[in-house]
Image (cartoon, helix red, strand yellow):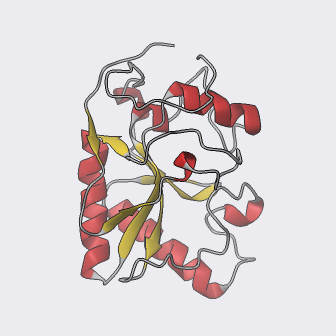
């Protein structure tokens, strides 16, 4: 797998909360994949996320980030748990997350409480898809609200996961996993 040392920047904004799920056991693997709580993104992705956070804040909302840049070691762990390319990118190819141009997130109210999205983060089921009509109308509106904010800020969505957004034209962004900016990972296999 080819890697590149692209600059990563921390996700910091007054209207963004970090709840890095892969730093805890509250994810599909059932155990921490990261031993840190810092979300990082490629600088282009961070600029787009700031635009989305500003739009959310103007409406009295916040963004809650569940995941951002994901090194190959963590991608391998996820693939071992769920080797389904509809939900987890094959680590031999690399993912939008390993390029630093993807973010998993939700909308929260002004107090930081996540809005109802119909399913939880990392619920890999048909109910998590954008456009799912089996969830409540309120959850459908919340998903549409998030999708609108993100689209206006330059992001595209992954159809199977309401929480996943990435920058378009991924080929412009090489994989990032050189270790110079990489936090350590818990129990991750060598890539």
Residue 24's spot in the image, x, y percent?
A: 58, 51
Residue 8's spot in the image, x, y percent?
A: 29, 35
Q: Residue at x 59, y 86 (%)?
A: 138
Asked if one can make out residue 77 in the rendered structure from this viewpoint, the answer is yes
175 shown above or below 32? above
Q: Residue at x 39, y 25 (%)?
A: 176
How many numbered discs, if any? 0
Q: Residue at x 41, y 27 (%)?
A: 171
Q: Report which quarter residue 89 is drawn in.
A: top right
Placement of the C terminus among the 4 image quadrants: top right
Q: Is residue 118 left or right of residue 51?
A: right
Q: Is residue 105 left or right of residue 178?
A: right
Residue 146's spot in the image, x, y percent?
A: 45, 70
169 shown above or below 137? above
Q: Residue at x 73, y 66 (%)?
A: 127
Which residue occupies the foreground of this view, 165 or 29? 29
Which residue occupies the foreground of this view, 99 or 74? 74
Q: Is residue 90 left or right of residue 105?
A: right
Which residue occupies the foreground of this view, 27 or 59? 27
12 shown above or below 53? above
Asked if one can make out residue 83 in the rendered structure from this viewpoint, the answer is no
Which residue occupies the foreground of this view, 61 or 140? 61
Residue 3's spot in the image, x, y percent?
A: 41, 16
Q: Report which quarter residue 74 is drawn in.
A: top right
């Amino acid at each position: 797998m080819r890697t590149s040392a692209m600059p990563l920047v921390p996700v910091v904004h007054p209207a963004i909360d970090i709840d890095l799920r892969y730093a805890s056991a509250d994810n599909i693997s059932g155990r921490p994949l990261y031993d840190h709580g810092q979300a990082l993104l490629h600088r282009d992705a961070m600029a787009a996320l700031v635009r989305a956070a500003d739009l959310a804040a103007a409406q009295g909302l916040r963004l809650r980030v569940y995941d951002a840049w994901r090194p190959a070691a963590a991608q391998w762990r996820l693939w071992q748990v769920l080797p389904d390319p509809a939900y987890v990118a094959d680590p031999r190819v690399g993912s939008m997350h390993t390029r630093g141009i993807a973010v998993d997130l939700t909308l929260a109210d002004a107090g930081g409480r996540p809005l109802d999205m119909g399913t939880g983060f990392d619920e890999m089921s048909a109910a998590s898809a954008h456009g799912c009509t089996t969830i409540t109308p309120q959850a459908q509106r919340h998903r549409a609200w998030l999708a609108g904010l993100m689209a206006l800020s330059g992001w595209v969505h992954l159809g199977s996961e309401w929480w996943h957004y990435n920058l378009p034209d991924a080929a412009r962004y090489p994989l990032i996993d050189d270790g110079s900016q990489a936090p350590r990972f818990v129990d991750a296999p060598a890539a």
